[in-house]
Image: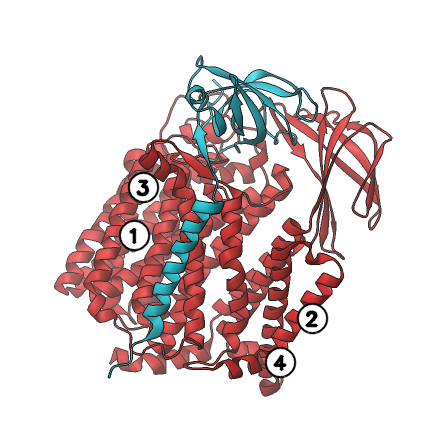
Chain colours: A red, B cyan
Amino acid sequence: MADLGRAALVVSFGLALYALVVGAAAAHLNRRRLAGSARNALLACFASTLVAAAVLASALVRHDFSFVYVAQHTNRTLPTVYALSAFWGGQEGSLLLWLLVLTGYGALAVALNRRLLRDLIAWVVPVLGGIATFFAFMLVAVASPFHTQTAPVDGAGLTPSLQNPYMVAHPPMLYLGYVGLSIPFAFAAGAMLSGRLDERWIVATRRWTLAAWTFLGFGQLLGAHWAYVEVGWGGYYAWDPVENAALMPWLAATAFLHSVMIQERKGMLKVWNMVLVALAFELSVFGTFLTRSGVVNSIHSFAQSSVGGWFLAFVVISSVFSVLLILWRLPLLQARTKLESALSREAAFLYNNLLLVALCLTILWGVLFPIVTELVKGESRTIGRPYYDFFLRAFGLPLLLLMGIGPLIAWRRSNVRALVRSLVWPIAAALVTGVVLIAVGAGSSRPGLIAYTFSAFVIAAIVVELVRGTRVTGSLFRLIGRNRRRYGGYIVHFAIVLLAIGIAGSSAYGTNVERHLSPGQSTTVGAYRLTYQGVDPIRNDPNRVGRYAVLHVSGPWSGTLRTGNVTYTGFNETDNDVGIKTDWLRAQDLYVIADFQNGSNVVFFNVLVKPLVNLIWVAGIVFLLGSLVAMWPDAREQRRLVLRLAPARA
Amino acid sequence: MTTRSPARLIVALAVATVLAIFLLYTAIAGKSTPQLSPSQLRSHPGVASVVGVVVGPVAGDSHTARGLRFGLRDRGTSNGVVVPVVYHGDSPPPLFRATREVVVTGRYANGRIDGTGIVTKCPSKYTASSPKA
């Protein structure tokens, strides 16, 4: 079986290389049949990669420990779903997943657009072939999942904290996002190589970008929720380089999704869009380099693996390629129209983009800071949470405000009086919210207060838009159905507001109390009173030993909460099993971490009340809903686009 | 007379603003911490972020005056310099134990780290463990 997997990967490499070389020659020489052959090679590359993936999946499910990869990441007691999730649990498997998704996405995107955008597709194929060649090469020559050995009795297994449903879904979601950004990049590069720099490449890739962006965003929220419920430190985001590696391309893609609207509508920001799409792609590969190279310290432990250098080389080469392409095509990337006023919707989009990119680059600077100081000063230095928090406020709060202003400001040109008139309701909502919050004592955190008043402003702006539109159509559903992209976007904006409220609430208004308690003792945290009733040891479980502290809670919620320390016998790994009680009415969590003291029944309790934290998870669902609405096929929009792009095709 | 688009002006002003904030932050508010390994500490007394492997025995309690006590050694070595750590503060994170890779933040003085923060590295998807023979 391993031979079949190896052979399939070699075939994938050959086909990807063919798509790159022959595809480029065909596009350059304008040889249509040869271009078709390169296109078919890309489709076949997906098929052969699928064979390799099936071989690995089969070995994982069968616990075939003659595969080194299977022995390193699974064992016989591992449930099938987690054995299968080991596909992306290790380096080699995750690279195979990357190639599989890339060739699958690529084959589908090329097949769907091959007639409509024939001249452009001829160049898209070699670009996708180039990316696939790199990953196939890595799998064939550097990190093959098909190395074999004499099968051991059992495998090493999967770390218990990774045996969690979130960890089954979170990594593939991120991969679907990272890899999905290759498609708009390949189309953008194809557009520049072919010289067809009208808006067709944007129209063809809009849903691909949206899908990749949705996967990346939702995948990050899944990871945050896993950290919150499983890792047991009370937080959900630590500004760690690995987390930032997913956030940076998401921010760049967010900027791109906004600025392409300006290009589609006004023919502006063409160079900027090319820069953004390249940045999003490069950052997605750079993130992979970060997580595989071990060049920066992270709370995630990384092997100092050999793939880092290869990824760095790929990032450098593809970045240089992108920059040279943009420079070469600058004369063709001139805007059709110009920004007429700094007070217009176009300008609001531009401000939004600048803030998003500034935030993205600031995070990148924070991630690279240890490397830069090592190179410049000979001493690696880190900048921690205060740096990131400072810039999140500096760029994030104005971004939040712009989400409310953007949809209500006029296209082309506006003035202060007209703007204020259109923003009367949002301004009133923000002021009322601010006054009420100060009155109820929530003015203690200035960033929290600003975040809440801005959130009220945005929600009011969205409501104003929906009310206005519904008056015209007579129904909210009809309104959303008529322009799914626009109103799907508003739903996503609403999700971002929920996210902002959740983050501000849980970080600015949270309560944290630490207490040593013996059985029978109580403590009060916020409106809750917790009484430590006693110890409940784990009994008759061959896989786990440990004990739980049982707490009686009274207050806004009454009941029993269990929290303790659990050691997984096969791994000698102790986890905090946190006690979480969610109060949906108040959208807050009572979060209790227990730490037993040296074998006694005295427990050190860390009790956190996290107001509004659950809005973060609700935001994830709303975000998904909004993205689906925006992505949903829209015949009316399609007709509009066909009419608009007809001259370009002629 | 040609009318120039304000887009370039806006971009230039935005870039300048970002650079100014960077300079301000790094010059006034920014605090970076040197990232060192235990063996580098002797020549760098003061506040540092130390990356190493926990060496047992791990004893004591971080919430008491005597603190949580353990040693820290360079990664990838089995018998290098072991720097003693006395840690006070929140309970060490889950997964903290001897042989784990951790990042300890604190002050190094008199041959000892007075730790104020510990981050235990998460089990990685990309670190292979040895299968049972």
Q: Give me the C-alpha separation between circle 2 and circle 3.
A: 52 Å
* Badge 1 amino acid: Ala
Between the residue at mark 2 and the residue at mark 1, the CA separation in whole angstroms equals 61 Å
Q: Between A351 and A532, which is closer to the camera in this rendering?
A: A351
**Tag 2, which secondary structure?**
helix
Q: Nearer the viewer, mark 4 or mark 1?
A: 4
The Cα atoms of the two marked residues, 1 and 3, are separated by 25 Å
Residue extending furthest left?
A29
Q: Position of residue A4 (x, y in %)?
A: 33, 37
Residue A71, x across and y down, in percent: 46, 27
Chain letter for mark 3, please.
Answer: A
Return the residue at label 3.
A311
Circle 2 residue: A432
Decide: few, some or many residues near mark 2? Use Cα within 10 Å; few <14, some 14-19, many ≥20.
some
Spatial CA distance of label 2 from label 4 is 20 Å
Q: Given the image, what chain letter belongs to the residue carrying mark 4? A: A
Which x, y percent locates residue A638? 41, 77
Q: Residue furthest top?
A: B79
State the mark number for residue A44.
Answer: 1
Instruction: Where is residue A277? Give x, y as percent.
Output: 35, 59
Marks 4 and 1 sit apart, C-alpha to C-alpha, by 51 Å
Mark toward the start of the polypeptide (4 vs 1): 1
Of residues A455 and A175, which is closer to you in this image?
A455
What residue is shown at x 25% (from left), y 56% (from top)?
A: A323
Looking at the rendered structure, the secondary structure element under dot 1 is helix
Of the two numbered discs 1 and 3 on the same chain, state the one appearing first in sequence: 1
Q: Please identify the quarter of the rendering in which residue A209 is found.
A: bottom left
Left or right of A76 in this view: B127:
left
